[in-house]
Image (cartoon, grey):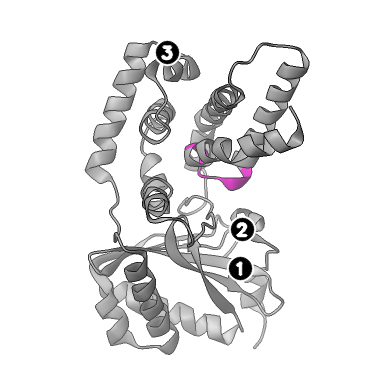
Amino acid sequence: MDEAELDRLRPAAFAIAYRMLGSVSDAEEVVQEGLLRLHLAEEGEERIESPRAYLSTVVSRLALDQLRSAAHRRETYVGEWLPEPLLTSSDADPARAAETADSLSLAFLVMLESLSPEQRAAFLLREVFDEPYDRIARIIGTSEQNSRQLAARARRHVEERRPRFEASREQREELASRFFAAAEDGELEELERLLADDVVLRGDGGGKAPALKNPLHGRAKVARALLGGMRAVARFGISSRPVEVNGQPARLFFDREGGLVGTMSLDIAGGQVQCIRSVVNPDKLGHLGPVGDLRALRGRRQ
Protein backbone atom coordinates (compact mmCIF):
# COMPACT_ATOMS: atom_id res chain seq x y z
CA MET A 1 0.00 0.00 0.00
CA ASP A 2 1.47 3.35 -1.02
CA GLU A 3 1.57 6.57 0.95
CA ALA A 4 -1.37 8.06 -0.98
CA GLU A 5 -3.62 5.17 0.04
CA LEU A 6 -2.54 5.47 3.67
CA ASP A 7 -3.36 9.18 3.55
CA ARG A 8 -6.85 8.37 2.25
CA LEU A 9 -7.42 6.08 5.23
CA ARG A 10 -6.15 8.58 7.78
CA PRO A 11 -9.20 10.93 8.14
CA ALA A 12 -11.67 8.17 9.02
CA ALA A 13 -9.25 6.67 11.53
CA PHE A 14 -8.62 10.09 13.09
CA ALA A 15 -12.38 10.68 13.37
CA ILE A 16 -12.68 7.58 15.55
CA ALA A 17 -9.58 8.25 17.65
CA TYR A 18 -10.36 11.91 18.36
CA ARG A 19 -13.92 11.23 19.45
CA MET A 20 -12.69 8.42 21.68
CA LEU A 21 -9.86 10.39 23.28
CA GLY A 22 -10.79 14.09 23.05
CA SER A 23 -7.14 14.82 22.28
CA VAL A 24 -5.74 15.75 18.88
CA SER A 25 -2.18 14.79 19.80
CA ASP A 26 -3.17 11.43 21.30
CA ALA A 27 -5.46 10.71 18.34
CA GLU A 28 -2.67 11.44 15.86
CA GLU A 29 -0.30 9.11 17.73
CA VAL A 30 -2.89 6.34 17.76
CA VAL A 31 -3.61 6.75 14.04
CA GLN A 32 0.10 6.74 13.20
CA GLU A 33 0.58 3.53 15.18
CA GLY A 34 -2.46 2.02 13.44
CA LEU A 35 -1.13 2.90 10.00
CA LEU A 36 2.25 1.42 10.88
CA ARG A 37 0.63 -1.84 11.99
CA LEU A 38 -1.40 -1.95 8.79
CA HIS A 39 1.72 -1.42 6.71
CA LEU A 40 3.66 -4.11 8.59
CA ALA A 41 0.76 -6.54 8.30
CA GLU A 42 0.66 -6.09 4.54
CA GLU A 43 4.45 -6.30 4.29
CA GLY A 44 4.19 -9.60 6.15
CA GLU A 45 1.68 -10.76 3.55
CA GLU A 46 -1.15 -10.99 6.04
CA ARG A 47 -4.45 -11.28 4.18
CA ILE A 48 -6.42 -8.09 4.76
CA GLU A 49 -9.75 -7.94 2.95
CA SER A 50 -10.55 -4.36 4.02
CA PRO A 51 -7.66 -2.05 5.02
CA ARG A 52 -10.22 0.50 6.26
CA ALA A 53 -11.91 -2.03 8.57
CA TYR A 54 -8.53 -3.36 9.73
CA LEU A 55 -7.32 0.15 10.56
CA SER A 56 -10.52 1.17 12.35
CA THR A 57 -10.30 -1.96 14.51
CA VAL A 58 -6.67 -1.36 15.44
CA VAL A 59 -7.21 2.35 16.11
CA SER A 60 -10.31 1.66 18.21
CA ARG A 61 -8.44 -0.87 20.34
CA LEU A 62 -5.47 1.44 20.83
CA ALA A 63 -7.77 4.33 21.76
CA LEU A 64 -9.69 2.11 24.19
CA ASP A 65 -6.44 1.12 25.88
CA GLN A 66 -5.56 4.80 26.25
CA LEU A 67 -9.00 5.60 27.64
CA ARG A 68 -8.60 2.94 30.30
CA SER A 69 -5.25 4.37 31.38
CA ALA A 70 -6.43 8.00 31.19
CA ALA A 71 -8.84 7.78 34.14
CA HIS A 72 -6.11 8.49 36.71
CA ARG A 73 -4.66 11.34 34.65
CA ARG A 74 -8.09 12.97 34.49
CA GLU A 75 -8.47 12.65 38.28
CA THR A 76 -5.15 14.41 38.91
CA TYR A 77 -5.60 17.08 36.22
CA VAL A 78 -5.30 20.63 37.56
CA GLY A 79 -8.60 22.48 37.16
CA GLU A 80 -11.31 21.55 34.72
CA TRP A 81 -10.44 19.21 31.85
CA LEU A 82 -11.72 20.11 28.38
CA PRO A 83 -11.02 18.33 25.09
CA GLU A 84 -8.35 19.71 22.80
CA PRO A 85 -10.03 22.15 20.38
CA LEU A 86 -10.19 21.04 16.77
CA LEU A 87 -10.59 23.51 13.92
CA THR A 88 -13.40 22.50 11.59
CA SER A 89 -14.49 23.89 8.25
CA SER A 90 -17.35 26.34 7.88
CA ASP A 91 -17.63 25.27 4.23
CA ALA A 92 -19.08 21.82 4.93
CA ASP A 93 -22.45 20.92 3.43
CA PRO A 94 -25.46 21.27 5.79
CA ALA A 95 -25.77 17.53 6.49
CA ARG A 96 -22.07 17.26 7.31
CA ALA A 97 -22.25 20.40 9.45
CA ALA A 98 -25.13 18.96 11.47
CA GLU A 99 -23.21 15.72 12.07
CA THR A 100 -20.15 17.68 13.16
CA ALA A 101 -22.12 19.85 15.56
CA ASP A 102 -23.74 16.78 17.08
CA SER A 103 -20.90 14.28 17.52
CA LEU A 104 -17.79 16.47 17.48
CA SER A 105 -18.79 19.37 19.70
CA LEU A 106 -16.86 20.01 22.91
CA ALA A 107 -20.13 19.67 24.81
CA PHE A 108 -20.68 16.20 23.38
CA LEU A 109 -17.11 15.09 24.04
CA VAL A 110 -17.26 16.35 27.63
CA MET A 111 -20.53 14.50 28.13
CA LEU A 112 -18.90 11.29 26.87
CA GLU A 113 -16.37 11.59 29.69
CA SER A 114 -19.09 10.44 32.10
CA LEU A 115 -19.25 7.05 30.34
CA SER A 116 -16.96 4.14 31.10
CA PRO A 117 -14.29 3.52 28.43
CA GLU A 118 -16.19 0.44 27.24
CA GLN A 119 -19.50 2.31 27.05
CA ARG A 120 -17.88 5.18 25.20
CA ALA A 121 -16.30 2.86 22.67
CA ALA A 122 -19.49 0.83 22.14
CA PHE A 123 -21.63 3.95 21.74
CA LEU A 124 -19.33 5.75 19.31
CA LEU A 125 -18.63 2.69 17.19
CA ARG A 126 -22.33 1.87 16.91
CA GLU A 127 -24.10 5.23 16.85
CA VAL A 128 -21.53 7.43 15.10
CA PHE A 129 -19.61 4.95 12.92
CA ASP A 130 -22.35 2.33 12.41
CA GLU A 131 -20.16 -0.66 13.22
CA PRO A 132 -21.91 -4.05 13.62
CA TYR A 133 -22.14 -5.45 17.13
CA ASP A 134 -19.98 -8.48 16.38
CA ARG A 135 -17.05 -6.20 15.40
CA ILE A 136 -17.67 -3.96 18.42
CA ALA A 137 -17.53 -7.03 20.66
CA ARG A 138 -14.18 -8.08 19.19
CA ILE A 139 -12.75 -4.58 19.58
CA ILE A 140 -13.83 -4.22 23.21
CA GLY A 141 -13.04 -7.81 24.08
CA THR A 142 -16.48 -8.91 25.20
CA SER A 143 -19.50 -10.83 23.98
CA GLU A 144 -21.85 -9.51 21.33
CA GLN A 145 -24.68 -9.47 23.86
CA ASN A 146 -22.63 -7.42 26.29
CA SER A 147 -21.60 -5.00 23.55
CA ARG A 148 -25.30 -4.42 22.83
CA GLN A 149 -25.94 -3.78 26.51
CA LEU A 150 -23.00 -1.37 26.76
CA ALA A 151 -24.22 0.59 23.74
CA ALA A 152 -27.81 0.65 25.03
CA ARG A 153 -26.80 1.97 28.47
CA ALA A 154 -24.59 4.59 26.88
CA ARG A 155 -27.35 5.58 24.46
CA ARG A 156 -29.83 6.17 27.30
CA HIS A 157 -27.26 8.25 29.16
CA VAL A 158 -26.43 10.30 26.06
CA GLU A 159 -30.05 10.93 25.08
CA GLU A 160 -30.77 12.32 28.54
CA ARG A 161 -27.86 14.77 28.31
CA ARG A 162 -27.22 15.26 24.58
CA PRO A 163 -26.40 18.91 23.78
CA ARG A 164 -28.65 20.68 21.28
CA PHE A 165 -27.60 23.45 18.93
CA GLU A 166 -29.15 25.89 16.51
CA ALA A 167 -29.88 24.19 13.18
CA SER A 168 -28.75 27.22 11.19
CA ARG A 169 -25.04 27.98 10.97
CA GLU A 170 -25.95 31.53 9.89
CA GLN A 171 -27.88 32.08 13.13
CA ARG A 172 -24.99 30.78 15.22
CA GLU A 173 -22.44 32.93 13.43
CA GLU A 174 -24.60 36.06 13.63
CA LEU A 175 -25.18 35.63 17.37
CA ALA A 176 -21.51 34.84 17.96
CA SER A 177 -20.51 38.01 16.13
CA ARG A 178 -22.83 40.05 18.33
CA PHE A 179 -21.53 38.28 21.45
CA PHE A 180 -17.86 39.00 20.79
CA ALA A 181 -18.58 42.58 19.70
CA ALA A 182 -20.49 43.24 22.94
CA ALA A 183 -17.73 41.65 25.04
CA GLU A 184 -14.98 43.61 23.29
CA ASP A 185 -16.90 46.90 23.45
CA GLY A 186 -17.81 46.47 27.13
CA GLU A 187 -21.56 46.51 26.45
CA LEU A 188 -22.79 44.75 29.59
CA GLU A 189 -26.53 44.98 28.88
CA GLU A 190 -26.19 43.70 25.31
CA LEU A 191 -23.93 40.89 26.49
CA GLU A 192 -26.39 39.83 29.16
CA ARG A 193 -29.21 39.76 26.61
CA LEU A 194 -27.23 37.24 24.56
CA LEU A 195 -26.55 34.93 27.52
CA ALA A 196 -28.97 32.29 28.79
CA ASP A 197 -30.08 32.63 32.42
CA ASP A 198 -28.15 29.49 33.35
CA VAL A 199 -25.14 30.10 31.09
CA VAL A 200 -21.87 28.46 32.16
CA LEU A 201 -18.31 29.72 31.64
CA ARG A 202 -15.64 27.00 31.72
CA GLY A 203 -11.87 27.31 31.44
CA ASP A 204 -9.02 24.85 31.00
CA GLY A 205 -5.51 25.99 31.89
CA GLY A 206 -4.21 22.65 33.12
CA GLY A 207 -2.21 24.45 35.79
CA LYS A 208 0.03 25.87 33.06
CA ALA A 209 -1.84 29.08 32.23
CA PRO A 210 -4.22 31.36 34.18
CA ALA A 211 -7.77 30.00 34.02
CA LEU A 212 -10.92 29.67 36.09
CA LYS A 213 -10.51 27.25 38.98
CA ASN A 214 -14.19 26.36 38.83
CA PRO A 215 -16.97 26.99 36.29
CA LEU A 216 -18.97 30.20 36.64
CA HIS A 217 -22.76 29.91 36.48
CA GLY A 218 -25.39 32.54 35.76
CA ARG A 219 -25.83 35.46 33.39
CA ALA A 220 -24.60 38.26 35.67
CA LYS A 221 -21.45 36.50 36.93
CA VAL A 222 -20.47 35.27 33.49
CA ALA A 223 -21.04 38.63 31.80
CA ARG A 224 -18.87 40.49 34.32
CA ALA A 225 -16.14 37.87 34.13
CA LEU A 226 -16.13 38.09 30.33
CA LEU A 227 -15.87 41.86 30.35
CA GLY A 228 -12.98 41.67 32.80
CA GLY A 229 -11.25 39.14 30.61
CA MET A 230 -11.74 41.17 27.47
CA ARG A 231 -10.30 44.28 29.18
CA ALA A 232 -7.20 42.23 29.99
CA VAL A 233 -7.06 40.99 26.40
CA ALA A 234 -7.01 44.58 25.15
CA ARG A 235 -4.45 45.64 27.77
CA PHE A 236 -2.02 42.88 26.83
CA GLY A 237 -2.32 43.58 23.11
CA ILE A 238 -4.00 40.27 22.37
CA SER A 239 -5.84 40.02 19.05
CA SER A 240 -8.39 37.48 17.89
CA ARG A 241 -9.94 36.06 14.76
CA PRO A 242 -13.18 34.12 14.23
CA VAL A 243 -12.99 30.41 13.46
CA GLU A 244 -15.11 27.30 13.84
CA VAL A 245 -14.03 24.94 16.63
CA ASN A 246 -15.59 21.47 16.83
CA GLY A 247 -18.46 22.65 14.67
CA GLN A 248 -19.27 25.69 16.83
CA PRO A 249 -18.45 29.43 16.46
CA ALA A 250 -15.25 30.39 18.24
CA ARG A 251 -12.28 32.76 18.41
CA LEU A 252 -8.55 32.16 18.46
CA PHE A 253 -6.52 34.62 20.58
CA PHE A 254 -2.95 35.65 19.71
CA ASP A 255 -0.23 37.66 21.44
CA ARG A 256 1.66 40.48 19.74
CA GLU A 257 4.17 38.05 18.24
CA GLY A 258 1.43 35.90 16.72
CA GLY A 259 1.65 33.13 19.31
CA LEU A 260 -1.64 31.42 20.08
CA VAL A 261 -2.65 31.89 23.73
CA GLY A 262 -6.19 30.52 23.81
CA THR A 263 -9.46 29.56 22.20
CA MET A 264 -13.01 30.45 23.16
CA SER A 265 -15.97 28.56 21.73
CA LEU A 266 -19.71 29.01 22.18
CA ASP A 267 -22.60 26.59 22.56
CA ILE A 268 -25.67 28.32 21.13
CA ALA A 269 -29.27 27.13 21.42
CA GLY A 270 -32.63 28.84 21.69
CA GLY A 271 -31.16 32.07 20.35
CA GLN A 272 -28.78 32.45 23.33
CA VAL A 273 -25.30 31.43 24.42
CA GLN A 274 -25.66 28.41 26.71
CA CYS A 275 -22.01 27.68 27.46
CA ILE A 276 -18.61 29.29 26.84
CA ARG A 277 -15.47 27.16 26.86
CA SER A 278 -12.01 28.69 27.01
CA VAL A 279 -8.89 26.56 26.50
CA VAL A 280 -5.59 28.23 27.42
CA ASN A 281 -3.53 25.17 28.39
CA PRO A 282 -0.55 25.49 26.00
CA ASP A 283 -0.27 21.69 25.77
CA LYS A 284 -3.67 21.66 24.06
CA LEU A 285 -2.91 24.39 21.53
CA GLY A 286 0.29 23.30 19.81
CA HIS A 287 -1.50 21.47 16.99
CA LEU A 288 -3.12 24.77 15.98
CA GLY A 289 0.15 26.66 15.44
CA PRO A 290 2.95 28.41 17.36
CA VAL A 291 1.95 28.89 21.00
CA GLY A 292 2.51 32.00 23.09
CA ASP A 293 3.10 32.23 26.84
CA LEU A 294 -0.01 33.63 28.50
CA ARG A 295 1.46 33.46 31.98
CA ALA A 296 4.53 35.47 30.96
CA LEU A 297 2.32 37.90 29.07
CA ARG A 298 0.28 38.61 32.16
CA GLY A 299 3.43 39.18 34.19
CA ARG A 300 4.77 41.91 31.94
CA ARG A 301 4.38 45.56 32.78
CA GLN A 302 2.21 47.31 30.25
Residue 166 occupies quadrant? bottom left
Residue 218 in sight: no
- Residue 152 position in % (x across, y down): 27, 26
In the image, is residue 21 part of the stretch drawn in magenta?
Answer: yes
Q: Secondary structure at mark 2?
A: loop
Q: Is residue 54 left or right of residue 165?
A: right
- Cα–Cα span, label 3 and label 2: 36 Å
Q: Nearer the viewer, residue 116 or 128?
A: 128
Q: Secondary structure at mark 1?
A: strand
- Residue 24 position in % (x across, y down): 59, 47
Please name the residue that numbered disc 2 is placed on: 285
Please name the residue that numbered disc 1 is placed on: 261
Q: Are marks 2 and 1 in contact (CB under 8 Å)?
A: yes
- Residue 302 position in % (x across, y down): 64, 88
Q: Nearer the viewer, residue 128 or 86?
A: 128
Q: Amino acid at mark 3?
A: Thr
Residue 129 occupies quadrant? top left
Q: Amino acid at mark 2?
A: Leu
Circle 3 packing at 10 Å, graded few (<14), some (14-19), many (20+), is few
Foreground mark, 3 or 1? 3
Q: Earlier in the sequence, mark 2 or mark 1?
A: 1
Please name the residue that numbered disc 3 is placed on: 142
Residue range corresponding to the magenta coloring = 20-25
Q: Earlier in the sequence, mark 3 or mark 2?
A: 3
- Cα–Cα span, label 3 and label 1: 43 Å
